[in-house]
């Protein structure tokens, strides 16, 4: 049998790329999950620039806090950069909801596992959990000043029209072509 040296210095059979220890270090569980269990479109989405940018914003909108743990378990669990952002309506169920900020909630890994288990129990359990998550988001945003304030501060929705003196929208043309008529 022909041998070669692994990157760590161990002798391994030439037919394999690297030893078991190096392979474990190289592949994170997310890479394995993406390659073996997740559909290709979702895997590509989760490494896209638009998702990474939105993920960062969602973490900051919620103050890096696990909302489920805060309001349901009454525990303050701060999020790390590696913690998941959960899609309330999952990608497989409705692809169009993938970038909807009101469909996203940041969770710790333990909380995400709990919610995933509730989703898998039954359709009724999944719907009830989704409803509960939406009510948590609503409660959280009410405490923070409302959806529009929070989401416009994070630039996730268009800010309200400001018709001040320097606004380009102040003098928009209408059907009768008069200037100064507010739309």
Image: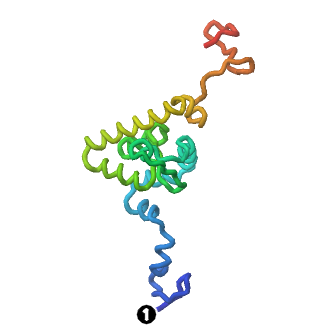
Above or below, 20 against 69 in this view is below
Answer with left or right where residue 38 lies relative to residue 121. right
Image quarter where the C terminus lies is top right
Picture coordinates of residue 92, whole percent (x, y):
37, 46
Q: Secondary structure at mark 1?
A: loop
Residue 63: quarter of image: top right
Screen quadrant of the N terminus: bottom left
Q: Position of residue 104 (x, y in %)?
A: 46, 42
Up the image or down, 19 lies above or below 177; here it is below
Q: Is residue 93 left or right of residue 154?
A: left
Q: Residue at x 62, y 22 (%)?
A: 161
Position above or below: 170 against 85: above
Q: Position of residue 100 (x, y in %)?
A: 48, 38
Horizontal and vertical percent position of residue 61 = 55, 40
Residue drawn at (59%, 37%) of the image: 154
Residue nearest the observer in this picture, 74 or 180:
74
Point out the residue furthest to the bottom here: 1
Q: How are the colours assigned in the image?
A: rainbow
Whether residue 8 sits left or right of residue 168 in the image: it is: left
**The one of 172 and 139 positioned closer to us in this rendering:** 139
In this rendering, would 114 be left or right of 182? left
User: How many numbered markers are drawn?
Assistant: 1
- For mark 1, does the 10 Å Cα neighbourhood hold few (<14), some (14 to 19), or many (20 or more) residues? few
**Most distant residue in the front direction:** 74
Q: For residue 103, which quarter of the picture?
A: top left
**Mark 1 sits on what residue?**
1
The residue sitting at 25% across, 46% down in the picture is: 122
Task: Identify the residue at horizontal 31%, vertical 52% (top origin).
Answer: 117
């Amino acid at each position: 049998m022909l041998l070669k040296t692994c990157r760590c210095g161990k002798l391994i059979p030439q037919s394999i790329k690297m030893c078991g220890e190096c392979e474990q270090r190289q592949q994170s569980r997310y890479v394995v999950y993406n390659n073996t269990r997740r559909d290709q479109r979702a895997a590509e989405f989760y490494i896209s620039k638009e998702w990474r940018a939105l993920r960062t914003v969602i973490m900051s909108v919620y103050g890096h806090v696990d909302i489920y743990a805060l309001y349901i378990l009454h525990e303050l669990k701060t999020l790390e950069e590696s913690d998941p952002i959960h899609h309330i309506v999952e990608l497989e169920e409705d692809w169009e909801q993938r970038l909807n900020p009101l469909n996203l909630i940041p969770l710790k890994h333990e909380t995400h596992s709990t919610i995933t288990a509730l989703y898998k129990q039954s359709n009724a359990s999944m719907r009830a959990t989704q409803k509960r998550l939406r009510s948590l988001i609503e409660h959280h945003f009410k405490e923070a000043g409302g959806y529009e304030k929070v989401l416009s501060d994070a630039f996730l929705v268009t800010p309200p029209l400001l018709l001040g003196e320097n606004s380009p929208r102040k003098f928009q043309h209408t059907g009768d072509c008069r200037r100064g008529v507010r739309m």
